[in-house]
Amino acid sequence: MARMKFLCDTERCIECNGCVTACKNENETPWGVNRRRVVTVNDGVPGEKSVSVACMHCSDAPCMAVCPTDCFYKTEEGVVLHNKDACIGCGYCFFACPFGAPQFPNGPAAFGVRGKMDKCTFCAGGPEENGSKAEFEKYGRNRLAEGKLPLCAEMCSTKALLAGDAPVVSDIYRERVARRGKAGEAWGWNTAYGKPEQAQERTQERAREQNREGAK
Amino acid sequence: MTTSTPRFRLGRLLVAGCLLLAGSLPLAAADNPTPAQQQAERQQTQPGNNAPVWREVRSGDSFFTTNRGPEAGVLIQSEGDTWRHLRNGPVTFYGGILLMLVAAAILVFYKIKGPLTLHDAPTGRLIQRFPRYERVVHWLTAGSFVILAVTGLTMLFGKHVMIPVIGHSLFGYLMVLGKNVHNFVGPLFAASLLAMIVIWARDNVWQNIDALWIRKAGGLITGEHVPSGRFNFGEKTWFWIGVTILGLTVSISGFFMNFPNFDQTRNDMQIANIVHSVSAIVMLLLAFGHIYMGTIGAHGAFDSMKTGYVDETWAREHHEQWYNDVKAGKSGHPQG
């Protein structure tokens, strides 16, 4: 079983915001909701670096841990999804998330009337039937069920944004780092996947990676 | 004047020294370049080494983005993890234990000691204890407090206590309602709380007779009736610590979370959340005591707040000083 992860190669990201647009268009998210955003550090200064960031689908997801209605669930592929019917819009997931992923259609509204939380689903929809109209209206496209990867990464013009099974993504990135001989920081991975509790998960990934190497 | 005395030379030396120091200041600034300068320089000396950028990202500062959401420019915030572990850890664990322990202790006390009853027979003559406006303010505060307590407790403990019983779906639907009720009743509680502080502050000032109440522990153990003013020291403690301090703390921290539209950061709301839950739990623990005394703990207490009137025997046995004042035609409020 795959373990889906995102990786943004900051040596390649050119801040075109194509991923942001692709996501918004594919999932038809409401006005003001941007599941993905691009942040540029030292904008305009030589050596500036851009990072495209959305939900990282953490191994030990903080949103999941603090949700008062326990509306989050994790798919077999490691994608963190949530049930909007049980979401109360309290904003706790937004307080807890290191990446600022949870979005609210009404924004920071008075009396906390934020509306149902919306976030990146790794283009994997929600609890409704795969590909159903109800699923699309609440969570956007379920591309994973169609055998496709998230559109943000698929549309990335420089292939800075990688999405897919962790060993495959790491392989591509490792090859790039080896070729350029530097800049090997997989940003956010330590926060999202690096906790000691996930040691076992990482061992399994490494084993699958070695299998892939052997098969080549 | 061309002669140069030693004193004059010293002055010139000082001036020169100052100029030298002033001149060296820009040099000192150049030793601490901004992170952006560091990164630009690093790209020249060690291309591909982005350590300055990652240091900046780690600091939690905000950077450029076209996204207009709150704190969208912040790439990573680590305070959320601290908040998560405080809330899910000690606040939930010790809060839950304390609430159960205190509730159990009060029940045990009731089983052993029973309620406070009148020693003498009631006279049948009634005396007004709470005018209508005081009762309205009390029940507004009390009613909204109970609603907030129930919905608030569900927000913190429902996941552990209710979901195993009623399931995710029903709990989710109930909580959509519960959260909105909590957020809209909150400001009503805050307003009635302020009114309550205003109308009862003068009755809760220290009176010398309170020392006697403290010495006898209110007669809670011995069962004897200790004289007191309009409010006894136990009620005063609840008023100042429970109602005033904790009530205001809960209200103010609640406003931080209930109105996120004032550009407060996630960190502000995390702190507000911890302050809110801790003070609300402590307030609830004290409220258990107050609700006990006001209902089953002391005969006649509930009727006094329901009807506004108490029997003269009740007044004399529970609040003798106040009873004497009212009988003597005074206001009953503590006299300065």
Image: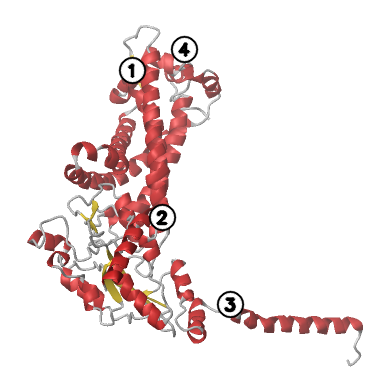
From the image, state whether disc 4 or disc 1 is nearer to you: 4
Residue wearing tag 2: A196
* Marks 4 and 3, how far apart at CA: 74 Å
Mark 4 or 3: in front is 3
Q: Are marks 2 and 1 in contact (CB under 8 Å)?
A: no
Q: Nearer the viewer, mark 3 or mark 1?
A: 3
The answer to which of A107 and B122 lies nearer the viewer is A107
Let me know if marks 4 and 1 both belong to one chain: yes
Q: Amino acid at mark 1?
A: Gly
Using the image, name the chain to which the residue with label 1 belongs.
B
Q: Amino acid at mark 3?
A: Asn
**Residue density around tag 1, few if under 14, some if 14–19, many if 20 or more, within 10 Å:** many
**Quadrant placement of the N terminus of chain A:** bottom left
Specify few, some or many for label 3: CA neighbours under 10 Å numbering under 14, 14-19, or 20 or more: few
**Mark 2 chain:** A
Circle 4 residues within 10 Å: few <14, some 14–19, many ≥20: some
Q: Disc 4 or 1, which lies upstream in sequence? A: 4
Q: Amino acid at mark 2?
A: Pro
SS class of the residue under badge 3?
Answer: loop
Q: Where A193 falls versus B199 (above or below)?
A: below
Which residue position holds label 3? B32
- Mark 4: which amino acid? Glu
- When the figure is inspected, residue A108 is found, relative to residue B167, above or below; the finding is below
Q: Quadrant of residue B186?
A: top left
Q: Which mark is residue A7?
A: none
Subunit ID for the residue under disc 3: B
| Marker disc for residue B300 | 1
Q: Nearer the viewer, residue B213 or B51?
A: B51
SS class of the residue under badge 1? loop
Name the residue beneath numbered marker 4. B224
Spatial distance from mark 4 to mark 2, Cα to Cα?
60 Å
Choose between B319 and A202: the one closer to the eye.
A202
